[in-house]
Amino acid sequence: MYPEKELHSELAFISYYFHWSLREVMELDHVSRRRWCKEISKINDLVSNKPKNIFDVK
């Protein structure tokens, strides 16, 4: 079973940035939720002008 704490973190993260409902996010499978979290994180890094971390393995 997927850890509840991580599930809630993913749900909150995607819902906050995309303004998707809980139902919409819950309909995503685990792989899709993780992928969206990574994509949102990449967008945040780009818009914040954060220098690229050469050790980041996203």
Image (tube, rainbow, N blue to C red):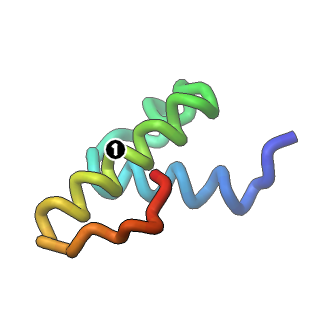
Picture coordinates of residue 23, whole percent (x, y): 49, 33
Residue depicted at x 46% and y 67%: 55
Q: Position of residue 51 (x, y in %)?
A: 21, 74
Please count the marks in the image: 1
Quarter of the view holding residue 53 = bottom left
In the picture, measured across the screen, residue 3 lies left or right of residue 54, that is: right
Q: Secondary structure at mark 1?
A: helix
State the residue lying farthest toward the front. 54
- Report whether 8 appears left or right of 15: right
Q: Does residue 56 sit above or below 4 in this rendering?
A: below
Identify the residue at the far right of this view.
1
Nearer to me, 13 or 37: 37
Tell me where residue 33 appears, x and y as whole percent. Answer: 52, 37
* Left or right relative to 27: residue 19: left
Q: Is residue 29 above or below residue 49?
A: above
Q: Which residue is mark 1?
A: 39
As drawn, is 12 to the left or to the right of 18? right
Q: Residues within 10 Å of mark 1 (few under 14, many from 20)?
A: few
Q: Give the residue type that dot 1 points to.
A: Glu
Give the residue drawn at x 43%, y 48%: 37
Q: Residue at x 65, y 50 (%)?
A: 7
- The residue closer to the viewer here, 1 or 22, is 1
Query: Would you place residue 34 above or below residue 54 in this image?
Result: above
Residue 1 image offset from top left, x and y in percent: 87, 40
